[in-house]
Image (spheres, coloured by chain):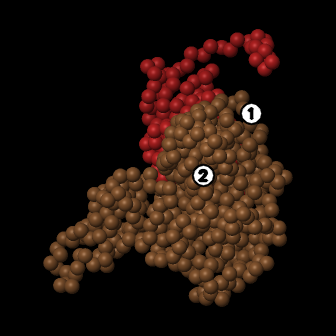
Chain colours: A brown, B red
Amino acid sequence: MGVNEAELAQLIEPGRVHRRLYTDAAIFDLEMARIFGTAWIYVGHESQVKNPGDYFCTRIGRKPVIMVRGADGKVRVIHNQCAHRGAMVVALEQGNAPEFQCCYHGWTYHLDGRLKAVPLQHGYPREFDAADPKTSMRQVPRVESYRGFVFASEAPDGPDLAAALGYMATSLDDMVERAPDGEIEIAGGVFKHTYDGNWKLYFENLCDAAHPLFTHRSSIEAAQQQSDAAYSDGTGEIALRQMRQNGAPYSFWESQVGIWTYPNGHSFLGDYHDDSKLVAAMNDPVFRDYIAALEAKKGKARADEVLAVRRWNSIIYPNLSFMSGFQQLRVVHPIAVDRTVVHAYTFRLKGAPDRMFRNTVSFANTVNGTGSLVLTDDLEIYNRIGIGLSSEGTEWLQVGRGFTSDVPDAHGGRRGKNSTSEVYIRNMLDAWLAYMTNGRAARAAA
Amino acid sequence: MKRAALRDRRKRAPAPRRIKPAPLDVARCEQFLMHEARLLDDGRFDEWLALFTEDAWYWIPIEPEQKNPFDTVSLIYDDRRLLETRVRRLASPRIYSQEPRSRTSRIVGNVTLEEAPPDRTACTVRSKFMVLESRRDSQRLFGGTALHRLVQLDGNLRIAWKRVDLLNCNAPLDGILVPL
């Protein structure tokens, strides 16, 4: 079943969205071409490929690609596919290689994807030209790094990364600026979660301030009832503090937190933490050495500015989310219309005390862990939406919370009157429609 | 005040009989592991928790041969305090990710005794396990190697720590709710 542009525009209405966005395989295929095939997609972080020959395998949409640092020091993204018979060339998730060699017939490639050598070359037709780009592992045409975060776009032309990020670059800045040495690195392994539901559901939950009190009540209550007299090596303490914070009352979410959205589907939710062991700015003993290091490197005034930024989840549409204040980052991999895999990473702030990273790991286990007491209930929600959508009971899904009260933001975006506005979902849907119709259709104005 | 109350209770209670811990052998450890597996299969999580010592930890690494739970994330890493919270949550009627409940069926085998002091009153027990988990419409199979540090307290075997190395620890997984 094909989908035409007029039809696409009819699937999004003020305050509601048609369920086909989450269930229709033809729409999913189109998303892979028009969103993941054109937008700036987060690929990886430069710290994953520090040295020439270092590579990291991931996907752009469904396409397997390799992020690799060339002999010239430049980071490129190339398709993980041999130009001969189409086999995947690099089989390990990451490593270091002087060149890439296909295990099928030995075609060998430079780190930038150009063909280097072909065994039995005399057997190919006279026109066969090893220098022809058609015999390369194809490069993704545009690759740009913003402060170490590597993005790639399959569109040969279009807005550059800075333009696409717009004001949301400030969330990536927040991620980096918190490092006393001004540099961060991916460390501490990766979680890989999977659920039977559409990829958009994941983002639609990330900045949802109205769900924790309900969805996460089992962990909130269990944490509230937990005696702190029981032994902890520090891990459980961090976990419990975070779970208790999830119990912040609706009145707090409504009055204190805030939600901001920007063009191209990006957004961030304000931070809701007031626990001194979780928020660096609150100057708990564990953070004191860190703050001292930050002040030593940046000066007190700048350090204060850095620590004053309070953001919880940031979303860089369509595949990246991170918690800049907590050194967490997630990459969403759409697998099928009803299947998604999410990779969750932790970052080390260079120049910060080791103890802080240990807390980052405990925090990751709590908010991003496959066996977490919190995330497991989010995964259940995605699975239940997946099942629920197979019902034809409700044709339109409601995303109208806050619709009439959203206000313009000083930096060219829109923000919710309070943090429980679903403005960030509507904002993603606007971007969705623009990508899907090449900018030709926009949601009807309110 | 708590401490004083404890002291009073100690005064009144008859002195516990001093039981010299017997050396551990494979048969007893295997029986213990089977008992633990049964508690988990039966959903008797409070009793399972009671098998652990007061400063125990329970760990499912996310990487094969992961060195520690502090420099790298883990599928699960619970100190005693968090393990208590995990078990309390499992009993909650509002644990939506266990509605419906998982049912599990486990097999424990290939039990060997590894590190132990010369008198073998404690030891690290290595075993292989397979856990079938059924929930809603799907069934999952978990398998791997478990290490239990078993100690004896008042004649009873207790778990000082447990490490579960899942064969597919680094693969994409849906949530893990029932302990392995």
Q: Is residue A98 visible?
A: yes
Please, what is the three-letter code of the amino acid marked with disc 1? Ser
Identify the disc placed on residue A180: none
Label 2: how many Cα within 10 Å (few below 14, some 14–19, many 20+): some
Total tally of numbered discs in the picture: 2
Which residue is drawn at the image coordinates 67% and 49% (left, top)? A309
Q: Residue furthest right?
A: A251
- For residue B58, which quarter of the picture? top right
Q: Is residue B69 left or right of residue A106?
A: right
Which residue is drawn at the image coordinates 76% and 70% (left, top)? A399
Subunit of label 2? A
Q: Is residue B33 visible?
A: no
Please, what is the three-letter code of the amino acid marked with disc 2? Asp
Of residues B144 and A12, the one nearer the viewer is: A12
Which residue is drawn at the image coordinates 62% and 29% (left, top)? B55
User: Against A352, is A399 above or below?
Assistant: below
Q: Is residue A10 left or right of residue A299?
A: right
- The percent position of residue A316, horizontal first and vertical second, equals 60, 63
Q: Is residue A179 left or right of residue B65?
A: right
- For residue A102, which quarter of the picture? bottom left
Residue on which the image places disc 1? A227
User: Against A191, is A13 above or below?
Assistant: below
Secondary structure under tag 2 reads helix
Of residues B157 and A282, the one nearer the viewer is: A282
Which residue is drawn at the image coordinates 79% and 52% (left, top)? A256
Label 1: how many Cα within 10 Å (few below 14, some 14–19, many 20+): few
The N terminus of chain A: image quadrant:
bottom right
Subunit of label 1? A
Residue on which the image places disc 2? A174
